[in-house]
Image (cartoon, rainbow, N blue to C red):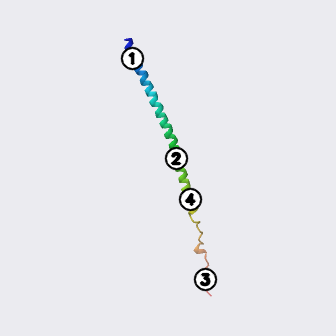
Amino acid sequence: MKSITEKQILEWKEELANQIKKRDQAKKVFDECTVNINALQGGVQFGELLLKKNESISQPLSKVEPNPQLKKAPSKK
């Protein structure tokens, strides 16, 4: 019975080590992805702001048209 229990404990320890290694690798991948996602989101925000800025610069200033009703009618002489 003792040897069976010792064997089981060894298997569990090996599996525990494998799972810890797997978790650590997954955490590393997760952290790298998080950094990449943040960088990409920043790039998207920068690009969108740049487009908005360029649109506002390239739009011609709107001219105020005088109200045609305020023009004086030609005088009848």
Going by the numbered disc 3, the residue's amino acid type is Pro
Instruction: Say what secondary structure mark 3 lies in.
Output: loop
Q: Is residue 16 above or below residue 69?
A: above
Going by the numbered disc 1, the residue's amino acid type is Lys
Q: Residues within 10 Å of mark 1 (few under 14, many from 20)?
A: few
Q: Residues within 10 Å of mark 4 (few under 14, many from 20)?
A: few
The reply to whether discs 1 and 4 touch (Cβ–Cβ < 8 Å) is: no
Q: Which residue is mark 2?
A: 41
Report how far apart the C-alphas of labels 2 and 3 lie in the structure: 62 Å
The reply to whether discs 2 and 4 touch (Cβ–Cβ < 8 Å) is: no
Q: Residue at x 50, y 43 (%)?
A: 37
Location of the C terminus by quadrant is bottom right
Report how far apart the C-alphas of labels 2 and 4 lie in the structure: 20 Å
**Residue 2 horizontal/vertical position (percent):** 39, 11
Instruction: Say what secondary structure mark 1 lies in.
Output: helix
Which label was assigned to residue 42?
Answer: none
Q: Residue at x 61, y 76 (%)?
A: 71
Going by the numbered disc 4, the residue's amino acid type is Asn
**Looking at the image, is mark 1 or mark 2 nearer the viewer?**
1
Q: Which residue is mark 1?
A: 7
**Looking at the image, is mark 1 or mark 3 nearer the viewer?**
1
Locate residue 66: give its quadrant. Answer: bottom right
Q: Residue at x 55, y 51 (%)?
A: 46
Q: If you read the primary sequence from the N terminus, does the residue marked by circle 2 or circle 3 appear first?
A: 2
Q: Which residue is mark 3?
A: 74
**Residue 65 horizontal/vertical position (percent):** 59, 71
Q: Residue at x 37, y 14 (%)?
A: 4
Which label was assigned to residue 54?
Answer: 4
The reply to whether discs 4 and 3 touch (Cβ–Cβ < 8 Å) is: no
Q: Is residue 61 above or below residue 28?
A: below
**Looking at the image, is mark 1 or mark 4 nearer the viewer?**
1
